[in-house]
Amino acid sequence: MSEYDDLLVDAYQGELVGATLFGAMATARTGSEREQLLMLQRIESRTAERLRTLIDPAGLDADDDQNALDDGLRLADATRDQEWSKFLSALRGALPPFLASFERLQAIGAPEDPVLADLVAHERAIDRFAELELQGRGGEALAVLEGHLASDCS
């Protein structure tokens, strides 16, 4: 596979991990944390679905879904009792390499492809959400997620 193909499949698998992680975490949380985690799950799921529209026509093998789901559940179990602010800090710390990969994918793919633009935008939105939430600006943080979900990548 080419670098593009590898990055595309990795991005797709990562979105499945994220959707599973956030969904599983939401079942153990309440209130605004639960609401935010469910929004994060929707963002990750939607991004994965959009990436699939690039993977399937290219005939790429991205069917290792069970491993991605298992990874997401393992991560959720490891963070089950973690304080919210520590989770958000860890999330922010984990995002830069993903963003760099997504930007690379967009650069070597079709820079104007709306699916790849959405991939980059979703990662930036999650980072901005976590940043604002850590600053105690929950309303603004939630608005970032809502804004991203309201956007259309086509």
Image: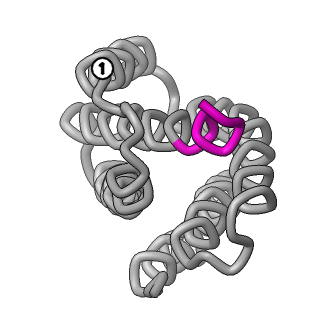
Q: Which residue is mark 1?
A: 73
Magenta stretch contains residue 41? no
Q: Position of residue 17 (x, y in %)?
A: 40, 32
Q: Residues within 10 Å of mark 1 (few under 14, many from 20)?
A: many
Residue 43 sits in which quadrant? bottom left
Which residue is depicted at the point 43% across and 78% down? 146
Q: How is the image coloured?
A: one colour
Which residue is depicted at the point 31% across and 23% down? 64
* Rendered position, 18 above or below 149: above
Predominant secondary structure in magenta?
helix
58 on left or right of 106 = left
Which residue is depicted at the point 63% across and 53% down? 130
- The magenta segment is 1-8
* Quadrant containing the C terminus in the rendered view: bottom left
Count the marks: how many?
1
* Rendered position, 78 above or below 103: above
* Three-letter code, disc 1: Leu
Q: Position of residue 121 (x, y in %)?
A: 64, 69
Magenta stretch contains residue 3? yes
Q: What kind of element bears circle 1?
A: helix
Q: Position of residue 139 (x, y in %)?
A: 52, 76
Q: Position of residue 141 (x, y in %)?
A: 57, 69
For the residue pair 81 and 72, the one nearer the viewer reads as 72
* Quadrant containing the N terminus in the rendered view: top right
